[in-house]
Amino acid sequence: MRFKKLLLLSLMATLFFILAACSDDDSNEGKKSDDGKKSEEVSGNTDGEDKVLIFARGGDSESLDPGSTSDGESSRVTRQVLESLLDFEAETFELKPGLAHDWEVSDDGLKYTFYLEEGVTFHDGTDFNAEAVKINFERFADPEHEYAFADDGYVYFMYETMFGGQKGDKGHVVDEINVVNDYEVEFVLNKPLGFFLQNMAMTYFPITSPAALEEYGATINENPVGTGPFKFVSWTKDDSIVLEKFEDYRKEGLPKVDKVIFEVIPDNAARLIALRSGDIDIMDGLNPDDAAGVEDDENLTLYARAENNFGYVGFNVQKDPVSDKKLRQAISHAIDRDAIVDALYAGYGTPAVNPLPPNYLGYNDEIEGFQYDLEKAKELLAEAGYEDGVKIDLWTMPVARPYMPDPETVSEIIQNNLAEIGVEINIVREEWAPYLEKTMNGEHQMYMLGWSGTNGDPDYFLSSLLHGNNIGDSNREFYENKEVDRLLDEAKVAVDQDEREAMYKEAQALIAEDVPMVPLVHSTPVMATSSKVKHYVPHPSTSESLEEVDIE
């Protein structure tokens, strides 16, 4: 199998072994058949006639029950298997129909009626209807729901973030969900939510087959069943996820390919080698330095996503010694963001100041941020009582992400920067899934991560990452400022966009003073495909449908 060969690539420690894994050998793995088509073995079956699209990425998915994770690698896969009521246009956050072909909003903004596509079936053969919509959204909202699966506690924290809380919470905006008939469903809100329709297109809230929820129970996170263009086949952890064409997909003539395999190849350079050798078809996480070479290669095609993210260093503000604000400010002044961008982004990144991309509603361009200033950093360090130095753990991302294509080097630059002021950094490394879980649980002092927008609204950045309600979930800073929370809560339900803009700007000013994180960079992520791949359009959210993609 080609993906077995790719696993070898990801495990090799040196370029010699990587190159050896890509060289010719006596096996048939990754070879072409006599007619020039790539042969592929999937789940024990070999079919040279199948069009197989292999998408290589830096890390594995965390969960395939979409609402239970904010991990982009999970959404990338579930986007193919499950569908939401609404969808985004191919290159923007403009709304278009999804499983709902039309919708209406009442004048007071409190009632949303969705008219559903008829004759749609889930991959298990059961019918998609309004009752399925109601069941899914009620399980997202209610921790006591029979299909709200979690080992302990509440699992659908992205619903809590985007809809103001859980069922019964004061801030929860969804009052009731009514099935009008089989193909008409009504959401009644108790207060307006300016981005309610945007939420309905997010990858976190698609519709899963109720029969599958009953069948799989808590293991639905490893057995997704939706209405999308591809149905789930298998998941080999830290290796590959295999999907196959759903023959009864509601859109005639789609999808174009027969199988999609999401391969894990942690190293960016190894992925590019695999792409050049023809072992994969699409790769994410291209090193910016390699972009020019890809652009000049007639066998490859270079793509760039819109700037819609930021990479950062975060502090657990409830854990010593970084509970000290002056220490956090000192560290912020000592990190050379310009050097990081110049060294690693090859013109595809800009230094970040706020935890929000500059093109978003409410971005506060009056905030200067903590400019690189070692003397000021030393002064603040002394004021914090650490003039003789301090040791801090920095947890470093083990995989490349769109906002940070080379996290290891970034961590080393930060380590060297902070050594200049007497802060000794111990770099901590974990595998991707444990990394996400342990930082969510607050085991870190400092850590590296980033965030990419998925609905085009500032609330998704600011509330997800920095609202006190999300501590222990997407708020890995364990940061809580009551005034920031109030501003974000009021902005969430405000209808007037000018009012929302003013509140978001004020919230950013307070956040900048508290320094729960150091924004490092906004990137324009680059990626590459074989020139044989046609009709691929990368979406700013990093999760695009592959239904139109074809292989020449």
Image (tube, helix red, strand yellow):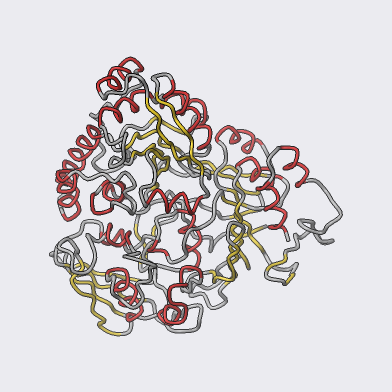
Residue at (23, 37) in percent of width and height: 511
**Marker count (numbered):** 0
Residue sitting at the far right:
26
- In screen coordinates, is 94 left or right of 223? left
Question: Quarter-wise, where is residue 316 in the image?
Answer: top left
State the image coordinates of residue 547 (x, y, percent, origin top left): 53, 64
Name the residue: 53% across, 32% down: 409
Image: 164 above or below 252: above
Q: Quadrant of the N terminus?
A: bottom right
Identify the residue at image location x=38%, y=68%.
150
Whole-percent x, y for residue 208 in the image: 42, 73
Q: Choose between 322 and 38: the one closer to the eye.
A: 322
- Across and down, in percent, residue 129 comes to 36, 81
Give the residue furthest to the top. Answer: 375
Please tell me which residue lies in front, 18 or 94: 18
Furthest-front residue in this view: 388
Taking 27 as reference, is 258 above or below it? below
Residue 109 point in image, percent of width and height: 16, 64
Depth check: give the residue in front, 498 or 439.
439
- For this view, does 297 lie left or right of residue 472? right
User: Considering depth in this image, is 207 or 406 the residue closer to the camera?
Assistant: 406
Q: Residue at x 43, y 66 (%)?
A: 65
Residue 274 located left or right of residue 158: right
User: In the rendered view of the protein, which quadrant contains the C terminus?
Assistant: bottom right
10 vs 83: above or below: above
